[in-house]
Amino acid sequence: MESLEKMRTFRDEHERVRRKLDRSFREAFEYLTKPVYFHKGVWRPPTDVVETPEAIVIKMEIAGTCKDDISITVEAGMLVIRGRRPEHPPLRKVRVSRMEIEYGDFEQLVYLPSYCDEKNIEARYDDGFLMVVVPKRSQETKETRSVPVTEE
């Protein structure tokens, strides 16, 4: 009789753990069945930054963005690229199974080394890619300055 009671206790405990695991998995993957909404925050576009002997080259994928909606500034040694990819109205009576394309405002910051020529930056937008070329200053034009040492 005692072994029968132990089996019931084990069975009940096993069932409790199974229900708990089922609930955990259901909650963990619940997002797959929920409707997907457009992301409303600022997002960061996929960006490549490469350095050549002559320049720092930034290539950013922002297809669907209008050239006039792109802003490029230099702030405190950082190249700041901001813009907006317009949201398209959602289709009616559809069930979205995957939505990976970001819409709305975007921003990307790129640190510029001190040897960059911030006054001669060029940018081109073509086929959904923004290409920003930040030339390096030549050796002769690199700015150096002395810092005087004072006595107290």
Image (cartoon, grey):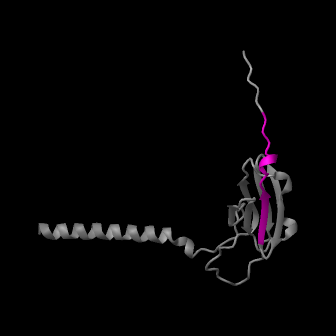
Examine the rendering and report whether any part of residue 54 can be seen: yes
100, 97: nearer the viewer: 100
Q: Position of residue 72 (x, y in %)?
A: 82, 58
25, 80: nearer the viewer: 80
Q: Residue placed at 78% from the left, 58% from the top?
A: 134
- Chain part drawn in magenta: 129-145
Examine the rendering and report whether any part of residue 70 can be seen: no
Q: Residue placed at 88% from the left, 67% from the top?
A: 68
Q: Residue placed at 85% from the left, 65% from the top?
A: 69
Q: Position of residue 40 (x, y in %)?
A: 72, 64
The N terminus, quarter of image = bottom left
Residue 23, picture quadrant: bottom left
Task: Reply above or below: 73 against 22.
Answer: above
Q: Is residue 68 left or right of residue 138?
A: right
User: Does residue 138 belong to the magenta stretch?
Assistant: yes
Q: Residue furthest bottom?
A: 93
Q: Residue placed at 72% from the left, 55% from the top?
A: 110
Residue 100, picture quadrant: bottom right
Count of numbered badges drawn on the protein:
0
Task: Reply above or below: 4 against 51.
Answer: below
